[in-house]
Image (cartoon, rainbow, N blue to C red):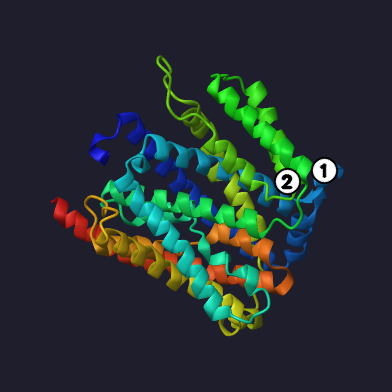
Amino acid sequence: MTEARRPAKAVAEFARYLRTETTGGIILLVATALALIWANSPLGDIYQTVRDFQVGPHLLHLNLSLGDWAKDGLLAIFFFVAGLELKRELVVGELSEPKRAALPVIAAIGGMVVPAVVALGVGWGSPGIDRAWAIPVATDIAFALGVLALTASNLPSSARVFLLSLAVVDDLGAILVIAILFTASFDLVAAGVAVLALLLYAWLQHRRVRTPWIYVPLALITWVAVHSAGIHATIAGVALGLLTRVRPDAGEEHAPAIRLEHRLQPWSAAVAVPLFALFAAGIKISGGSLGEVFTTALPLAVMIGLIGGKVIGIFGASALAVWLKIAERPRGMSWRDVGALSLLGGVGFTVSLLIADLALTGEASELAKTAVLIASGVASLGAAAVLVHRNRVHARLDD
């Protein structure tokens, strides 16, 4: 199904998604700048104290620092919204048509595998690279869509669909990496509770139960069970999103997934993700530490993986898929447009910072997160410059 023939409601929902994520990208940028300024100011000790302040009951390992609550709790909301969007695209959107769905999925896989291989190659032998290779696999949805919206309003809507689909699949892949790589211990009983809660959620969706008085406690139980099982709690968000119904019944104006997106996405884009960035991006930067980013193998591996690996992986996988005729290039897009979006894929940010927090500790974590910020900034500026040029080209073509 092409963009022109997609149901009007699906197009409207997609446009709303883009508007919200664009606004969220701007707030995210402000939160990141605030974190960096605060952490490197005379009030830096207060920043550390606030971030590390622990709150919550000791029961079920829920006595967490505010930084961990942002990482484990608030990002679960972000990934729930991402799961809803992925489910909607798979069932009624662009990804529901195999030929159209193939390209962003293949591009996302290339954009995960190649950066990981590049990072491993550059950082081979460095302490921590056995886990840090996962840092450059992610693409930040909010930041990437924000840059695209601000610089390339004349690009065809297929470009936005391609980038959104790629980023959602990419983040889902990153979450699977987190689940496999960073599950240090495993509580079988808690995992069983999580599975039962998810099955109950799916059954309630099937039975068309709509009351939040059941779903909100059930979602909280699922999150606590996943967290207690030793699996990163954001997995709960993705799983619940993918189990939510996206097709409206007869006489139903919106399916549950659409209603939930309406209610939660503004909170995810404007509150959850920026607060995570506020606690994750507060890195103390000095001349010496900044120099280490460019002279130490591990942060170099992260930067090259994000900036170089993403471009090669996304563009190379896309070109190969089209050449093998297993996918189609998005309607109205040239290969130069695909190249610009591939560069934008190097904006790792949110999930890359999350993986850096999970993979590394101490100075290594700080260097890796600094590398993520630098690489995401370079990718954003580079992509913006190319997209501004492509925007002018498309504007002339439309005249």
Vertically, is 347 above or below 241?
below
* Label 1 crowd (10 A; few <14 / some 14-19 / many >=20): few
In the image, farthest residue toward the left: 399
**Residue located 57% across and 39% down the image:** 267
How many numbered marks are there?
2
Looking at the picture, how far across and down is residue 303, in whole percent? 52, 73
In the image, farthest residue toward the top: 251
At mark 2, the secondary structure is helix
**Residue located 81% across and 51% down the image:** 54
Q: CA distance from mark 2 to mark 1?
A: 8 Å
234 or 66: nearer the viewer = 234
**Residue located 68% across and 50% down the image:** 232
- The quarter of the picture where residue 392 lies is bottom left
Q: Which residue is mark 1?
A: 60
Looking at the picture, how far across and down is residue 2, in whole percent? 25, 41
Tag 2: residue type? Answer: His
Looking at the picture, how far across and down is residue 115, in whole percent? 48, 69
Asked if the residue under mark 1 is in contact with the one under mark 2, i.e. CB atoms within 8 Å, the reply is yes
**Residue located 33% across and 44% down the image:** 98
Q: Which residue is mark 2?
A: 227
366 or 175: nearer the viewer = 175
Left or right: where 218 falls relative to 105:
right
Tag 1: residue type? Answer: Leu
At mark 1, the secondary structure is helix
Q: Which mark is residue 389?
A: none
